[in-house]
Image (cartoon, grey):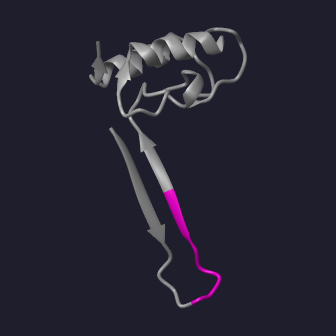
Amino acid sequence: ESYTVRVRAKTDSPSAYAVDMAFRQVGDSDGNGLFDTSDLVRVMQHGKYRSGEAAKFEDGDWNNDGWFNEQDFIVALQAGYFHD
């Protein structure tokens, strides 16, 4: 599942602004709301797995440590949302 949260400052200031933040399900690298085989294929195609190159969520860095490695698979699978 994906969630969007809108945060607004409680102020009368004309410089106040709203910020939208999207929260994606762990493993959902393609943003379709599901963690499934297509996400696994996608992240492996990006070529960052254990490459030593910094990675983002879309590249497979699902534990947010800046790298795509086996720890990301552990976190994603432990979350229990994988759909085959």
For the residue pair 14 and 77, the one nearer the viewer reads as 14
Q: Residue at x 28, y 18 (%)?
A: 83
For the residue pair 55 and 36, the one nearer the viewer reads as 36
Q: Residue at x 55, y 24 (%)?
A: 61
Number of marks = 0
The range drawn in magenta is 13-20
Q: Is residue 12 above or below residue 81?
A: below
Q: Main secondary structure of the magenta part?
A: loop
For this orientation, the residue located farthest to the right is 53
Q: Is residue 77 above or below residue 50?
A: below
**Left-right relation of 52 to 73:** right
Q: Quadrant of the C terminus?
A: top left
Q: What is the x, y in percent for residue 65?
A: 58, 28
Q: Quadrant of the N terminus?
A: top left
Question: Is residue 2 shown in magenta?
Answer: no
Q: Is residue 27 above or below residue 40?
A: below
For this orientation, the residue located farthest to the bottom is 12
Q: Residue at x 47, y 81 (%)?
A: 10
Q: Residue at x 35, y 28 (%)?
A: 34
**Left-right relation of 34 to 47:** left
Q: What is the x, y in percent for residue 6?
A: 44, 63
* Residue 43 in which image quadrant: top right
Q: Is residue 44 above or below residue 33?
A: above
Q: What is the x, y in percent for residue 72?
A: 48, 19
Q: What is the x, y in percent for residue 53?
A: 72, 17
* Residue 50 in which image quadrant: top right
